Image (cartoon, rainbow, N blue to C red):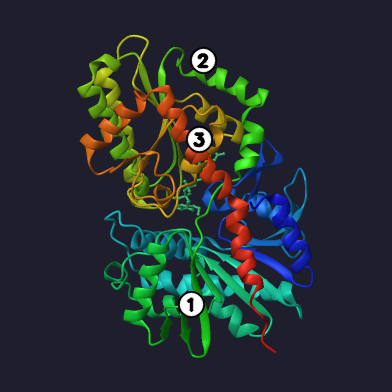
Amino acid sequence: MWQKENLQNLIKDKMKDYLFIVVSNREPYVHVRKKGNIEWIRGIGGVTSALDPVMQSCDGLWVAYGHGDADRDVTDSKGKVRVPPDQPSYTLKRVWLTKEEEQGYYYGYANEVLWPLCHMAFERPIFRSEDWECYKRVNEKFAQAIIDEIGDRKAFVWIQDYHFCLLPKYLKQKAPRQIITAHFWHIPWPCHEAFRICPQKKEILEGLLSNDLLGFHIRQHCNNFLETIDREIESKIDRERVSIIKNDHETLIRPYPISVDFTGINEVVNSVAVQEKADALIQEFELSERQVLVGLDRIDYTKGLPDKLRAIDRLFAKHSELYGKVVFLQIGVITRLHIKKYKELNDEINALVEEINWKYAVSHWKPVVFVRRQFSLIELLALYRISTAAIVSSLHDGMNLVAKEYISSRSDHKGMLILSQFTGAARELTDAVLINPYDCDEFSEGIFQALNLTEDDRNKRMIKMRKIIHENNIYHWAGKIISELLEFEFRD
Ligand code: GDG
C-alpha cells in the first residue's frame, strides 16, 4: 500500500538528478496582512489540499500565482519562499499577475469558459476573445518563470488543471529536450457534443497533446477526451496503449482517482483538540441531543447547494416528526465572487435558507444553519465527527474530496455519506447513500434513509468505504502518476 514513506523513497531514489516542479494556479500558502502583521493561511480547494503533503515529502518546487496582499513581502527577488512557513520543507515560487491578467485569464477564460464547459451543470460558457488572448499570455508567463528556474537542468513538470492548457506546449517549445510533463485535469472532461462549441477547441487540444502524460479522475473522462480528439484533431489513437500520437509525439491518457491523506486525517481526528472543537460546535449551534446533517462546499453552482436546500425543505415538509430533532449545518466558503453567476447563487442560497427557516423554525430550533467562515482543519474534522450524515450534492464533480475526507474522519465507523451519483467519488464509494440531486423526492428520501440506518448497517458500510480510501489514498494517487512520469526518457 502506498504511504508517505514509499513516495518519499521513490522521489529520493529516482528524482535526485532532476528538478521536480508542480505548477498550479492556486498557491498552497498565502501571506496576508492582519492588523499590521504578516500572517499566513493555507490555500483552500481540492488541488492544494491534495498536493501539499506530496510536496512536503519530496522538497520540490511549486510554481503558483501569488495573490496574497503580503506575498511580495516574504519572497526573494525571484518570487521564492520556503514553505510551509512553520515547517519549511519545499520552495514556493510565486508568479505575479496584474489585475487585468487575473480578470482575463482566471475569472474570464478559466472560470467563465472552461469551468462551465467541462461541468454538465447547464451553465452557458461566456466566450470573449480578449480573455483568450490574456489566458495565452499568462500561460506564456508561467512557462518563462519555469524555464528561468530550470537553467540547463532536466526537469519533470507536473501541471495542475484547466488553467494551463497551453503551458505544456510553450514549455516544450522553449526546452524540448529538458522537460517531461504530466498534466492532471481535476475537473470532468465533457462529451464531445458539449466540448465542440468552444471556439478555441483546436488550440486547447493541441496544447494538451504536448504533454507526455495526461490524467483524469475516471475512465469515463479519459474516454470522452479520446472521443473529442478523434473527432477534432488529425492524429492516431492507439487503443491498446491508450495514447494519442500526433506529429511523432505520444501522449498517454490515464485515469488516476485523486484521494486524501487517510492516515494523516486519522492521526488528527482522535485528538483532544478535535474533541474540544466538536463540543464547542455543539454548544455554538445548539446541536445537543439533535441529529446533525452537515455539508461543506465552496459556493459554486456545480455543487448543487440550492438542490441540497430544496431536499432539506422537502424532508421537513414530509416528516414533521423531525422538527426540533434534526439540524442541517452547512459550511460554505465564497469563491469567485467577481463572477455574476456566483453572486446570484449566493443570493439564491440566502433566500432559500431564510424561507426554510421561516417555514419550520419553532422556539429554540431552526432547521438550517449556514456558516460562511472558513473552517480550520481541526474545525472541519470536528464538524464531520458530530454528524449523523454528510451531504454531497454536486450536479457534476471531477472527484469531490469532501466525500473522501468525511469517510476518512469517521474512525468511529459512525455517520453516513449521502453522495451525488454525478461525482467521481461515487464510482468508488458505492456503499454511500447515492442520490440524484435533480430528483428532489429521491434526494430527500435518501436523507431520511441515512438518518434512520441501523447502527449495524452504518458500521458495515463505513468499514467498507474506509478500506477503499485507506488503500487508494493521496500517496497512491501521486505515487502512480510520478511512477509513470519517471518511465519517460528525455530526448537526446
Ligand atoms: C476540484 C474539483 C476534485 C472547503 N472549505 C473549507 C475547506 N475546504 C476544502 C475541503 C476539500 C476541498 O476544499 C474541496 O475539494 P473538492 O474536491 O470538494 O472540490 P473543488 O474545490 O471543486 O476541487 C474536484 C478536486 O479539484 C481535486 O482534484 O475532487 O472535483 O472540482 O479538501 O476540505 N478546508 C478547510 N476549511 C474550509 O472552510 N480547511
Tag 2: Cα neighbours inside 10 Å, few (<14), some, or many (≥20)?
few
Question: Which mark sits nearer the N-terminus, 2 or 1?
Answer: 1
Q: Residue at x 32, y 48 (%)?
A: 395
Q: In the image, residue 337 lies at what x, y percent?
A: 42, 48
Which residue is at the front of the view, 247 or 123?
247
Question: Which mark sits nearer the N-terminus, 3 or 2?
Answer: 2
Q: In the image, residue 65 lies at what x, y percent?
A: 60, 60
Between tags 3 and 2, which lies in front?
3
Q: Which residue is mark 2?
A: 283
Which residue is at the front of the view, 95 or 123?
123
What label sits on residue 122 in the rendered view? none
Q: On the rendered image, what quadrant is the C terminus found in?
A: bottom right
Q: Residue at x 70, y 74 (%)?
A: 155
Give the residue type at disc 3.
Ile
> How far apart are labels 1 and 3 at the CA level?
35 Å
Q: In which image quadrant can residue 203 be found?
A: bottom left
> How far apart are labels 2 and 1 at the CA level?
56 Å
Q: In the image, residue 296 lies at what x, y percent?
A: 45, 37
Question: Which mark sits nearer the N-terminus, 1 or 3?
Answer: 1
> How far apart are labels 3 and 2 at the CA level?
29 Å
Q: Is residue 44 left or right of residue 146?
A: left
Q: Marks 3 and 1: in contact by CB < 8 Å? A: no
Tag 1: Cα neighbours inside 10 Å, few (<14), some, or many (≥20)?
few
Q: Marks 1 and 2: in contact by CB < 8 Å? A: no
Q: Which residue is mark 1?
A: 241
What label sits on residue 463 in the rendered view? 3
Extreme residue in the top direction: 363
